[in-house]
Structure formats: structure tokens, C-alpha cells
Amino acid sequence: MSTPFKCAVKDCENHSHQGKFVGLLCSPCHAFVAGDGGLYSQAYRNSRSMIDLAVAMEREAIGQKLDDIEVVAKRLALDLECVLLNPSKWHNEAHESLQQYRNLMDTWYPQEHVSPLGMD
Ligand SMILES: [Zn+2]
């Protein structure tokens, strides 16, 4: 029988003689690293703060997007109302608002230009 060893994950206190191991990792840590559960492992606890940070950053980005689209949507609605009342007077402002929306979409969802003929 081989000499017992500690799970390779930092701060994990599981040792090879205590339960199932996969290579250098205890079974729970291995399951987490392999993407197959392991939510009670030290590997999961070690990564938890990074996961929380990533989720917080994603929420912040979504909140900013909602703020940006709200500004553009309000302006588009106002310009539409104005254009419907007086097309010649508000035509240019409406085009500016539409371009503002297009610019925002280009920023959020950049796409390579593809010509209609399949070549540039
Ligand atoms: Zn472990």
C-alpha cells in the first residue's frame, strides 16, 4: 500500500487513505474540476470568491446596458412621436437617434463586414 498523501488542492484536508481519489485529487475536488458537481469540495470553496466576483461584474455590465438602452429607447420614442406629428421638421433628429441606436448595437454586437457578394 502506498504512502497516504494530501489532496493536491490548496487547503483541502482530504487524504488518500480516507476515501476515493482520482490521481492527485480527492473525489469531490476532482468532480468539481471535471465539471461534474463537487459543490462540497475545497476546490469549489477556493473558486467561490472568483465566481462571486464574476457574477457581480456580469450584473454590473447588464445594469449598464439597461441604462444605455433606456436612454436610447426614450429618445427614439420621442423622435417617432415628433416625426409622426411633423415629418419634415423632425426628420434629421430622428435619423440621428436611429444612428445612435445603430452605434450602440455595433458596440454591443460587433460584426465583421460581409459584402452581399461574399467578397470585399
Ligand atoms: Zn480535495
Image (cartoon, helix red, strand yellow):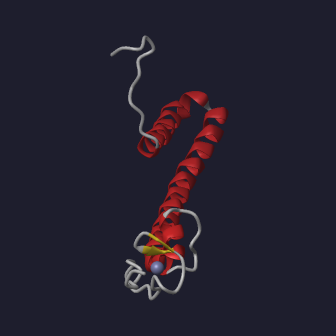
Residue 72 in picture, x, y percent from top left: 53, 48
Quarter of the C terminus within the rendering: top left
Residue 40 in picture, x, y percent from top left: 57, 80
The residue closer to the viewer here, 15 or 112, is 15
Q: Does residue 79 appear left or right of residue 96 in this picture?
A: right
Q: Does residue 1 appear left or right of residue 80 in this picture?
A: left
In this picture, is 110 found above or below 1? above
- What is the residue that sits farthest to the front in this orientation? 1
In this picture, is 80 found above or below 10? above
Residue at x 58% of width, y 48% of height? 73
Res 10 → quadrant: bottom left
* Count of residue discs: 0
Quarter of the N terminus within the rendering: bottom left
Res 118 → quadrant: top left
In this picture, is 7 found above or below 58? below
- What is the residue that sits farthest to the top in this orientation? 117
The residue closer to the viewer here, 47 or 120, is 47
Residue at x 54% of width, y 35% of height? 90
Residue at x 39% of width, y 80% of height? 2
The residue closer to the viewer here, 119 or 61, is 119
Residue 20 in picture, x, y percent from top left: 54, 76
Residue at x 48% of width, y 81% of height? 42
